[in-house]
Amino acid sequence: MEVANLLDPSFHGCRLTSNSMNRISEFVQKYYSNNAVEIWTQILNYKEKSGVFANKLAWETVGKVDPIVWWYGNFNDSASELTQMAKRILSIPTSSAASERNWSAFAYIHDKKRNRLTPDRVLKLVYIYSNYKLQMPKEIIEWKGLLDELNKTTLIDKNNADNIDNPNDEIQISIENEENDDEDEYLLNSESESESESENENESGNETDKTNESNNSYVFY
C-alpha cells in the first residue's frame, strides 16, 4: 500500500512511483475529507523533512523503535492529524484474506461452464463483482444475511422431516393395532359364549338326568 510505504519512516516513500502522490492525495480526500488540507500539508513537510519534521534526532531513531511509537513520541503534538492517520494505516496487519477473496471471485466467474472467457473479460467481470459488493448498501447486506439464516433453518427442517418415518406407516400401524384389538375382543366374546353354552348344556343334562331318575322310580313302584 502506497500510503503505508510513505508513512513508515523506515521506507519514507522510497518505493513510490510518479503517480503515487496523486493516488495518496485522492485517498486523503476520500477518507479524511474533514481535515484533508492539514493532513496533506503535513505529508508534504514529512516527505521533504521540513518544518516540524526537520528534527534530525527523530530521523536518527528510525528503525530503532516501532513506527507507531516513533510517530507518537515525536509528532503527536506538532502533527496530530498525520500522526493519527499514520497510526491507523500502520496498525493494519498483513493478511492474505484479500487474495483469498480475489481467488474466490475468479473461481466464481471463470468456472467450468464459462471457461471460454478471455482474460480481459474475466478481469473486467471480477472488477465489477468486487466493487459492487463493496458499494452494496448496508440494508441489502443485512437482508441477504437474513435470507441466508432462513435458508439454513429451512434446510435443517427439511433434514429433520426426512428423518421422520412416513406418516402413512404410522396410520397403517394404528389401523393394524385396532384390527388386532377387535380380533382379540371377538375371540374373548366367542370363548365366553362357548363357556356359557357349555354351562347351559350341562345344566340341561343334569335336569334331564333328574327327570329320568324320577320316572324310573315311579315305574318301579
Image: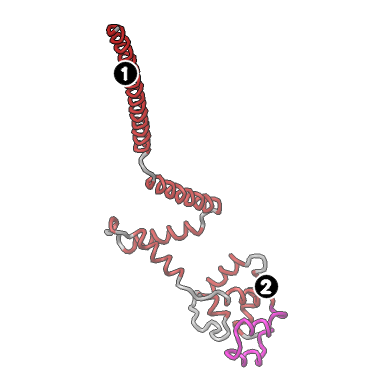
Tell me residue 134's x, y (percent). Answer: 50, 59
Q: Residues within 10 Å of mark 1 (few under 14, many from 20)?
A: few
Report if residue 70 lies within the magenta region. yes
Which label was assigned to residue 201? 1
The span shown in magenta is: 52-79
Residue 26: quarter of image = bottom right
Residue 77: quarter of image = bottom right
Label 2: state its secondary structure.
helix
Marks 2 and 1 sit apart, C-alpha to C-alpha, by 123 Å
* In this rendering, position of residue 148 left or right of residue 182: right
The amino acid on which the numbered mark 2 sits, given as a three-letter code, is: Glu
* In this rendering, position of residue 169 left or right of residue 21: left
Tell me residue 176's x, y (percent). Answer: 34, 33
**Image label count:** 2
Vertical position of residue 83 compared to residue 30: above or below: below
Vertical position of residue 134 compared to residue 176: above or below: below
Read off the residue under disc 2: 38
Q: Nearer the viewer, residue 195 or 115?
A: 195
Mark toward the start of the polypeptide (2 vs 1): 2
Tell me residue 189's x, y (percent). Answer: 36, 25
The amino acid on which the numbered mark 1 sits, given as a three-letter code, is: Glu
